[in-house]
Image (spheres, helix red, strand yellow):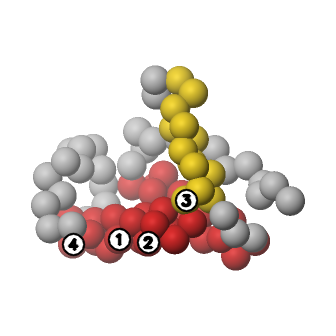
Amino acid sequence: MSDLAWVPQSCTLPAEERPLQVAEWDALLSERLTSLSRPQPLHLRLDLAGGQEVEDRVRDLVERESGCCSFFTFTTPPART
C-alpha cells in the first residue's frame, strides 16, 4: 500500500514503519481469515484459521498495534479446538 493517508493522526507508529505493519495485517488476513462479522456498529469479529502459531502471531501483532494506536481495542480469546 503506497498511500497511508487514512492513518489517524493519533497513531504513534513512525511513518516509515506503517507500511510494514499494514503488510503484516494484510498477510495475516489474506492467509488466515475464515470469516468476519460486525455484531455491533463499532465491533468487528475476525475468525482466523490456524493453531497456536497463528494465535501467537495474532497476539504479537495486536500488542504492537495497541501500543501505537490506542484508539483500537482488541480482544483475542484462546483458539477454539
Tell me what residue is drawn at x 57 percent, y 66 percent. Answer: 32
Q: Where is residue 71 in the image (x, y as percent from the top left)?
A: 41, 39
Q: How far apart are marks 3 and 1 (CA)?
A: 15 Å
Can you name the residue that lies furthest to the front here? 34
Secondary structure of the residue carrying tag 1 is helix
Name the image quarter holding the C terminus.
Answer: bottom right
Q: How far apart are marks 1 and 4 (CA)?
A: 12 Å
What kind of residue is marked 4? Glu
What kind of residue is marked 1? Ala
Of discs 4 and 3, which sits in the foreground?
A: 3
Of discs 4 and 2, which sits in the foreground?
A: 2
Q: Name the residue under label 4.
A: 16
- Of the residues under marks 1 and 4, which one precedes in the sequence? 4
Q: Mark 2 points at which residue?
A: 27
**Residue 21 visible, this angle:** no
- Position of residue 25 relative to residue 72, above or below, is below
Q: Where is residue 59 in the image (x, y as percent from the top left)?
A: 62, 62
Q: Name the residue under label 1.
A: 23
Q: Distance between the residues labelled 4 and 3?
A: 26 Å
Instruction: In the rendered structure, find residue 33 and report the number of the disc placed on it.
Output: 3
Name the image quarter holding the N terminus.
Answer: bottom left
Q: How far apart are marks 3 and 2 (CA)?
A: 10 Å
Of discs 1 and 4, which sits in the foreground?
A: 1
Pointer 3: residues within 10 angstroms few (<14), some, or many (20+)? some
- Of the residues under marks 4 and 2, which one precedes in the sequence? 4
Secondary structure of the residue carrying tag 4 is helix
Tell me what residue is drawn at x 52 percent, y 71 percent. Answer: 31
What kind of residue is marked 2? Ala
Secondary structure of the residue carrying tag 3 is strand
